[in-house]
Amino acid sequence: MQSRLRMAALAIAATVTWVPAAFAGSAPVENKVHLDLQITGLGHDGCVLEIKPAHPSCTFPKIQKAIRASEISDPLRLSVNVVAQSSGADRDCSFTIILKEPGRPPSTFLRGVRLAPTVAGKPVPLQSLRCFLNTATVAGKAEPGRSRR
C-alpha cells in the first residue's frame, strides 16, 4: 500500500514539473499565409471584402478591400498575403471572411489553417490556403394556389 502511494506521489510530482516546462518556452508561431479566394454568386454592384482573425490567439492586421463593380467576375479570384501569428498550443490560425454587398445581408465564412512551426535560422514558413466561397442565395418562390403546411 505504501509503495502505491509513493508511486502516485511521484507521478503527480513529475506531471506538475513537466507540464509548465513544456509550455513555458513556447513563443508565438509566425507564418506567411497566402489566401487564394475564389468567390461565386456576387451581384453586379461591387462589394467590400473584410478579413480578420476569428479568435484571440491568432493575430494579423485586419484587411479591408473594396471591389468595384467593374472588377466583378464569376468566379472572382483574389490573392491576399497575410503574416499571421498564433500564440495557441495548437498553432491554429482562423480567418473570418466577410463579404458585404449593397442590398444583401453580409456573408460570413470561417476558414482556418494550422501554422507550421518556425525553425531558428530558417525563413518564415509559407502556407497556402485556397478558399471557395459561394454567396449565391436561393429564394423560394411561392406558387399561386399552394400553401405550405
Image (cartoon, rainbow, N blue to C red):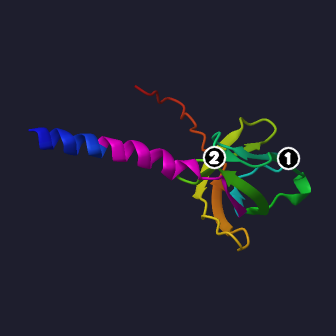
Q: Where on the picture, by quarter, is residue 35? A: bottom right
Residues 66 and 104: in front is 66
Label placed on residue 92? none
The residue depicted at 69 percent of the width and 44 percent of the height is 53
Q: Residue 49: where, in percent of width, then height?
A: 79, 48
Q: Residue 90: where, in percent of width, then height?
A: 52, 52
Magenta span: 12-33
Residue at the extreme left of the image, as rendered = 1
Residues 149 and 130: in front is 130
| Horizontal relation, residue 63 to residue 147: left or right | right
Label placed on residue 45? 1
Badge 1 marks a residue whose secondary structure is loop
Question: What amino acid is labelled 2 in the image?
Answer: Phe
Residues 61 and 40: in front is 61
> Is residue 120 depicted above or below 104 in this figure?
below
> Is residue 99 depicted above or below 103 in this figure?
below
Where, quadrant-wise, is the C terminus in this rendering? top left
Instruction: State the residue position of label 2.
Output: 109
Per the model, the C-alpha gap separating discs 1 and 2 is: 20 Å
Question: What amino acid is labelled 1 in the image?
Answer: Asp
Q: Where on the picture, by quarter, is residue 70? A: bottom right
The residue depicted at 63 percent of the width and 46 percent of the height is 109
Q: Earlier in the sequence, mark 1 or mark 2?
A: 1
The residue depicted at 40 percent of the width and 42 percent of the height is 16
Q: Residue 116: where, in percent of width, then height?
A: 60, 64
| Horizontal relation, residue 62 to residue 69: left or right | left
Q: Is residue 100 magenta?
A: no
How packed mark 1 is, by other alpha carbons closer than 10 Å (few <14, some 14-19, many 20 or more), is: some
